[in-house]
Image: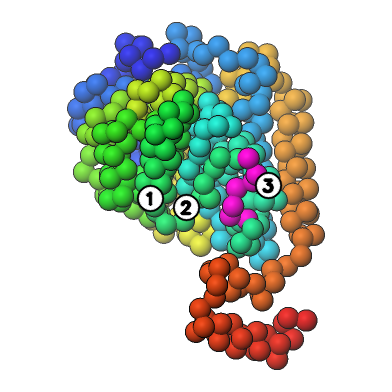
Amino acid sequence: MAFQEHEKKKTTSSEEVVSPNTPSAMHTSPIDLGHIEVLQILNEHGEVDSGLEPDFSDEKLLEVYRSMVLARAFDKRMMTMQRQGRMGTFAPNIGQEACIVGQVTSLTKDDWFSPSYRSFGAQIMRGWSMKHLMRLWAGFHDGFPPPKDVNDLPFSIVIGSHVLPAVGIGMGMNYKKKRDCVLVNYGDGASSQGAVSEALNFAAVYKAPVIFICENNGWAISTPTKKQSANEVLATHGVAHGMPSIRVDGNDILAMMCATKEATNRARNGEGPTFIEAITYRMSLHTTADDPKVYRNDEEVKVWESRCPIKRFETYLTNKGILDADSIEKMVTSCNDEAIQARDAFYAMPPADPTEIFDHLFNTIPEELQKQKEEYLKRLHQKGVDE
């Protein structure tokens, strides 16, 4: 399904545009979208546009559905652990499962993924164990490196900092004449970072095989998109840098899968980068250190709860005869059990060794730092911490 086909069948002007900061999912925008395609295949009621419905196998659809349910099970388990004081600060992903999982379904093991910090659903699908991700969020140094044979970068905490390295990986693919691609995601807040604009421009000029996913969830922590950008249609950033761009309903898993499939095909064929703005909504906290009630009202959240990407996909799969109430319940139970098993395995691992704090900075530790290390270890010994 080429972007040109989407343009013929879906809105391509300013008539209807998804916006996360308004009660209506589709609203009239004063921005002239020009040739930016707007794609929705599965609406919020689980009704499919038969003219755009992709031909994915039942097995593929079930795999994707389970990945979304598992991401939410992991999310809820991590939230419980954090509130119990047994996990560090955590960035919940509730409401964005389709956006996150859908973007990596077309990637192969040879492709690369450069994630932001709310991407654990995609990371699990790419081969990260939940226990590994728990180690990461708990601050263990061995949690950040990706698993063996997984072509992922560690997720980025510094906003937008991971976008330029992703373009560098894409340029490396060009130099080596590899028909692979790299996908990088970032939030609407990161779109204001200069490094992101530099990455877009460089990739466009040199036709780097990069897929840029701007996850517009409506809030850059407490700043709504309308206060961050004079142009709320962030897909225009891609157009401004001369690359094909599309605006996708990020709560529509089918639309996300189709848009990223087209983009990865373009990249592998040497046609350069693609920009995808995924409109979604952060239904929970920015992080567990955040209180969204301070800056947004509950009514807005309730509207988006009715657009839950998992419920929407369940309706679709049930209508196709792939799921029923019993299989949904079994799937949810299975995913919850898997998250609990990961939690128990994480708890069974030895605690952090405070004596290792200096071990991963330098190959040969400088004299001044060596003195600090000796003083630190001495104090640990005095307190009995190293015993």
Mark 1 is on which residue type?
Gly
Relative to 167, is 386 on the left or the right?
right
Residue 108 covered by magenta stretch: no
Q: Which type of secondary structure does the marked residue at label 1 adopt?
A: loop
Mark number, residue 156:
2
Mark 2 closeness class: few <14, some 14–19, many ≥20 residues within 10 Å: some
Residue 147 covered by magenta stretch: yes
Q: Are marks 3 and 1 in contact (CB under 8 Å)?
A: no
Q: Which residues are the magenta region?
A: 143-149
Mark 2 is on which residue type?
Ser
Out of 251 and 384, give the one closest to the viewer: 384
Mark number, residue 130:
3
Q: Is residue 109 positioned above or below 296 on the image?
A: above
Which residue: 51% across, 50% down? 155
Mark 3 is on which residue type?
Met
Q: Are marks 3 and 2 in contact (CB under 8 Å)?
A: no
Which residue: 77% across, 31% down? 330
Q: Position of residue 21 (x, y in %)?
A: 35, 41
